Image: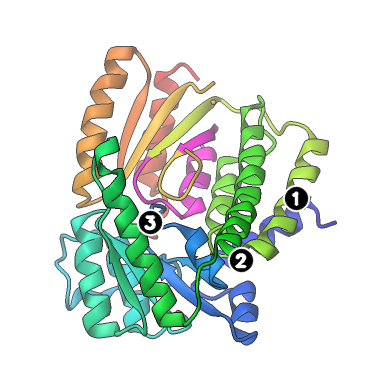
Amino acid sequence: MKDKQEILEIFGQVISGPMNRYVSRWKDSGNKIVGYYCSYIPEELFTALGVFPYRIRGAGSKDSSVADAYLSARLCTFVRHSLALALSGELDFLDGVVSLNSCDHIRRGFDLWKIKVKPKFSYFISVPRVQDDRVLFWFEEEMEGLKKALEDHFGKKVTPEGLSSAITLHNRARILLKELLDLRKMDPAPLSGAEALTVSVASQLIPERDLIPLLEDLLAGLKKSGGGQPARARLVVAGGELDEPQFIRNIEEQGGQVVADDVCFAIRFKADGIIFQRMKFCDIWAGESHNMFWRMKKAGIPILVLDREYLVPASGQVQTRVQAFLESMGK
């Protein structure tokens, strides 16, 4: 059984760039991989066809200039860096890409994927924007369209048995992740916020058959180890796309511990305050940060709002603001 440090090192290597040992092994076995944007994409459909669903990120990009030539400087750096990887050929291991209308930036980026990258398979899903039974049939039709497109392209059929097996497999991984991240309710928690985000991100870049044994070993080890070191304050980090654990690590180095996350890559516990982060030019999360700021102020819950860029860890200025935030809570 692998210990905590060994598993976290594996996960850290997995999230450091586009390619990792599990993706390489999957490809070497002659299997297919389809990249996708956003958690609204149903991973089980891909797995039921024997295709690995791979979450597209921008990690490993050093320079977004090749994408900046086609995109406005006012588009978020997440889209620009992920497209730069694709244009540079570093995502050529993907056998296709699926996107959706999560925001106008992603929508524009997908147009360029089709025109400039020319993936072997591409599909776009229209996701309902309201939670209402009336749109259930609309979303069902979107899923049926994706299913048929995948079947036609890969020459396989999604059978009820195959889909049921895929759902069981993904649910097993989700249950383990929930049990793992629920340990953060402990005070002190045995898993730091940076470590938890590392696990969450890595879980979307490793096929379930390889992921589940790693999660089982990590969970067993953490349950035996007990809590970690006490923190000045327990924090929630909220906001948009965040897949860089170093950003969380820099916050925790100021004495806070991130015990829960409400970000795109993490699991959506008692906390003392909220840090809301968003990437510059992200209109959706700018509106949400404004609304949350005033709701929390009214409720008497401490909140700090930070702007950031993709792949840029917390700066000295951010660290200073976090320190001041903790002091304002009397921590």
- In the rendered view of the protein, which quadrant contains the N terminus? bottom right
Give the labeled residue for mark 1.
Answer: 216
Q: Is residue 206 left or right of residue 72?
A: right
- Residue 242 part of the magenta-drawn span: yes
Location of residue 144 with respect to 68 vertically, above or below: above
Q: Nearer the viewer, residue 271 or 109?
A: 109
**Residue designated by label 3:** 38
Magenta region, residue range: 239-261
Residue type marked 2: Pro
Is residue 283 shown left or right of residue 241? left
Type of amino acid under label 3: Cys
x, y percent for residue 76: 24, 58
As displayed, is residue 258 above or below residue 139? above
Q: Residue at x 32, y 76 (%)?
A: 122
Q: Secondary structure at mark 3?
A: loop
Image quadrant assignment for residue 166:
bottom right
Gap between marks 2 and 1 measured at Cα? 15 Å
Name the residue: 38% across, 49% down.
315
**Residue beneath disc 2:** 207
